[in-house]
Amino acid sequence: MTKNTKTVLVLILAVVLIAAVPLFALRGAQFGGSDDAGSVMVKEITGGEYEPWFTPVLESAIGGELPGEVESLFFCIQTGIGVGIIAFCMGRLVERKKWMKKEADGHDSNR
Amino acid sequence: MKKTEKRTVALAAVFALTFGIAPAANAMHIMEGYLPVQYCVIWGILCIPFLAAGFFSIRRTMNEHRKTVILLAMSGAFIFVISSLKIPSVISGSCSHMTGTGLGALLFGPAAVSVLGIIVLLFQAMLLAHGGLTTLGANTFSMAIAGPFVSYGVFWLLKKCHVNRRVGIFLAAALGDLFTYCVTSFQLAICYPSEAGGIGASLIKFLGVFAPTQIPLAVIEGLITVAVMIGLEAYASPELKELRFIGEEK
């Protein structure tokens, strides 16, 4: 294993730990979105229910909040698009490196 | 930057500073409808010069370094992935997500990222009711402009000081992420000054909500960005050299 591979593995491990620890450390916490915590804070500061003056386009189109399952679908689509592009590009780059190396070796042996 | 491009950016900047009338304003993770109209418009206008500069910067990169398009696509996709992952935070017991703008900012410059960022924000605002169309300007400013500029600045500053590259990348991505949320807090605070302490007091309150959640996430973002960079250095060194991101020291 090269040094870089090791570094990457350690980094990934650290990321997973940081992300997973809260679940075990704070049992029973709500883990709501901090965007929502923001609107609670607005309520606290202005001292009253704030009426948003504009509802999200999609919500007014379907006449209500987006169902939770569908929302997670959209988040998955977003992740999927991103991962797809990254994986495709990375695959090309990795193959290219192999191919370039082979070509360089080929030139050497021809000499 | 070419002359005409400079002129257009300058024009947009002048327009932004002098006029209060503008096309529909857009934003990041301030909730839809939570900013008063005039603020939506102001933040929207402030974004226009950056978006124009970003558009020209991307076009120039595409003309001069055609093959780096693969990295541009990957930077954009990186923002897509990273900003869709909601991660629990140990400090506050709530979830938030990262911005992912550091990678693109280091490779292509902060202006280019503003264009990539607004695409993601539009996606989230329209389909996910996350952020919103009316707050798009404010959110673009915080996530796709302020954050990347901080990342870029931090990275070059550390490079000048000959700090280890990877430490530089880590700090740049993490601080950019954190700064995004400071800007968001500021944007909310100036709209909702608290009665007792004014803008300052509410700024502290909003920071109290966002900052603790975001600190561990900023660390994660820094680590992921370093990991991706290591991958890119291994497999995409021709492109990185073309962008002058690596190569000088070797």
Image (cartoon, coloured by chain):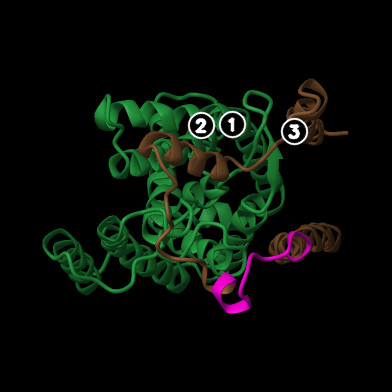
Chain colours: A brown, B green
> What's the chain of the residue with tag 2?
B
Q: Position of residue B38 (x, y in %)?
A: 25, 59
Q: Secondary structure at mark 2?
A: helix
Specify whether residue B246 is in view. no
User: Are the numbered discs 1 and 3 placed on the same chain, yes or no?
Assistant: no
Quadrant where the C terminus of chain B sits is top right
Magenta part of the protein: which range?
A59-70
> Does residue B236 lie above or below B68 as drawn?
above
Q: Which mark is residue B213?
A: 1
Q: Residue at x 52, y 45 (%)?
A: B102
Task: Report the residue marked by disc 3.
Answer: A19
Snapshot quadrant of residue A69: bottom right
Callout 2 environment at 10 Å: few (<14), some (14 to 19), or many (20+)? many
Snapshot quadrant of residue A7: top right
Q: Position of residue A110 (x, y in %)?
A: 84, 64
Q: What's the distance in space between the residues labelled 3 and 2, CA to CA?
A: 19 Å
> Does residue B185 lie above or below B161 as drawn?
below
Q: What's the distance in space between the residues labelled 1 and 2, CA to CA?
A: 7 Å
Q: Secondary structure at mark 3?
A: helix
Task: Report the residue marked by disc 2.
Answer: B209
User: Are the numbered discs 3 and 2 placed on the same chain, yes or no?
Assistant: no
> What's the chain of the residue with tag 3?
A
Please state which amino acid type lies under the numbered disc 1.
Thr
Please state which amino acid type lies under the numbered disc 2.
Val
Q: Position of residue A9 (x, y in %)?
A: 81, 34
Quadrant where the N terminus of chain B sits is bottom left
